[in-house]
Amino acid sequence: MAFNIPRGTQDILPGESERWQYVENIARETCHAYHYQEIRTPIFEHTELFSRGVGESTDIVQKEMYTFADKKGRSLTLRPEGTASAVRSFVENKLFANPIQPTKLYYIGPMFRYERPQTGRYRQFYQFGIEAIGSSDPAIDAEVIALAMSVYRKAGLKNIKLVINSLGDKTSRAAHREALIRHFEPRIDEFCGDCQKRLQQNPLRILDCKKDRDHELLKSAPSILEYLNEESKAYFSKVQQYLTDIGISFEVDPNLVRGLDYYNHTAFEIMSDAEGFGAITTLAGGGRYDGLTEEIGGPKAPGIGFAMSIERLLAALDAENVKLAIDQGIDCYIVTLGEKAKDFSVSLLYKLREEGLSAEIDYECKKMKGQFKAADRLNAKYIAILGDDELSQNKINVKDAETGEQQEVKLDEFIRYMKAHTER
């Protein structure tokens, strides 16, 4: 019986996995510069965490979660996003008690949503995300956005666009909510079943509907910006000022609402403008979620974060024809001739690797010509040639694969020689 990979998942094979590691390293290094520390949360959580934290009215909770009962009948869910888990850990482990706030976290890992697979969208997908929990300063909003933009730029993307909006505070949202209900209610029967449910649950989500996106009422819907109170206006103005001060250009889109219930104040998306990238242009999205810690049983601790898709980042790099500077070769390939030389090469190979050099030998009993071909296929920088005669004379011949130059080196100096010539 042949087994196939489940629909909506992918194997990331050698050759491609190096690209993933490259962009993940960029993300980690950027987080280090911004003083965000890694958090690793469970792949599955209690279902209620997501239903309360993400929101009952969201498509994620209503349609997309992988939920199952364990052997004791408890409802568990594979995590569909990273924020709820990070905030749960922040509360449970009392990170709010640390003297330095905000708590600045990042994560990289798989998420799971049952949705129709398409280009750049999978049922198991990988996200890099950050959370800054414990500050209501608009400067941290600008920092979070700047970090996301920095990752994309360091990876090599040029055709990206930042779109921001304010969802206001609780008072502003309540006023806007009533205005949306008044706007949509007389003709709500013209909308899809999901939107009809959202009218009372969370009418803001109607603006994010994919089925009814061309309906005339969406284009004439009241803007949240018209209902911002003075405090919310001042907050949003500060965020824009900070982004301008650090040289990050942006567009304000009053229809940007994001798909999760916990957002307030700042919301943002980063999109690809690359030609031919596809219909779904969003690379990353995030926003402020003041009140989420209290919703899941913690103290008041305002927060902001974002999540970006690793798959979509790589797809955007492909769309812009960006070649990542990945060194896929090895430092040294040891070619052997003779049984004694082969036996000795095993310990020599080990010593090279222990000194941090990438090295290989032949395991298929190939002749010398075949070993040289293998060294070429592995893109070896140096080829060390060791025969029984050389072994008896305590020497080894080292060939620079790029220049073709060959040097005779004493065996007891070989490791030192290789380290000196392959310093990174």
Image: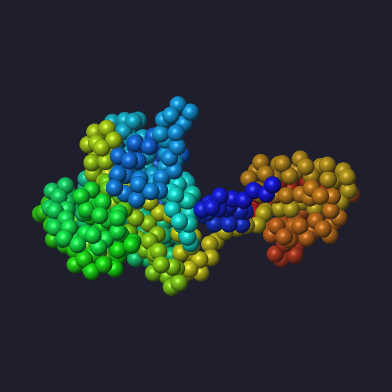
Q: Is residue 168 left or right of residue 417?
A: left
Q: How is the image coloured?
A: rainbow
Q: Vertical placement of 217 versus 420: above or below?
A: below
Q: Residue at point 35% right, 30% down?
A: 93
Q: Viewer-proximal residue, 277 or 157?
A: 277
Q: Viewer-proximal residue, 20 or 292?
A: 292
Q: Viewer-proximal residue, 417 or 268?
A: 268
Q: Is residue 337 visible?
A: yes
Q: Is residue 99 visible?
A: no
Q: Residue at point 70% right, 49% down?
A: 359
Q: Vertical placement of 384 versus 89: above or below?
A: below
Going by the picture, which residue comes out furthest to the front?
189
Q: Viewer-proximal residue, 356 or 289?
A: 289
Location of residue 334 in the rendering, given as x and y in whole percent from the top left corner: 77, 51
Location of residue 171 in the rendering, given as x and y in whole percent from the top left corner: 13, 48
Location of residue 218 in the rendering, given as x and y in whole percent from the top left corner: 23, 65
Going by the picture, which residue comes out furthest to the top?
72
Q: How many marks?
A: 0
Location of residue 270 in the rendering, given as x and y in whole percent from the top left corner: 35, 61
Q: Vertical placement of 314 versus 171: above or below?
A: below
Going by the picture, which residue comes out furthest to the left?
230
Q: Residue at point 31% right, 49% down?
A: 58
Q: Vertical placement of 199 versus 322: above or below?
A: above
Q: Quadrant of residue 348?
A: top right
Q: Residue at point 19% right, 62% down?
A: 187
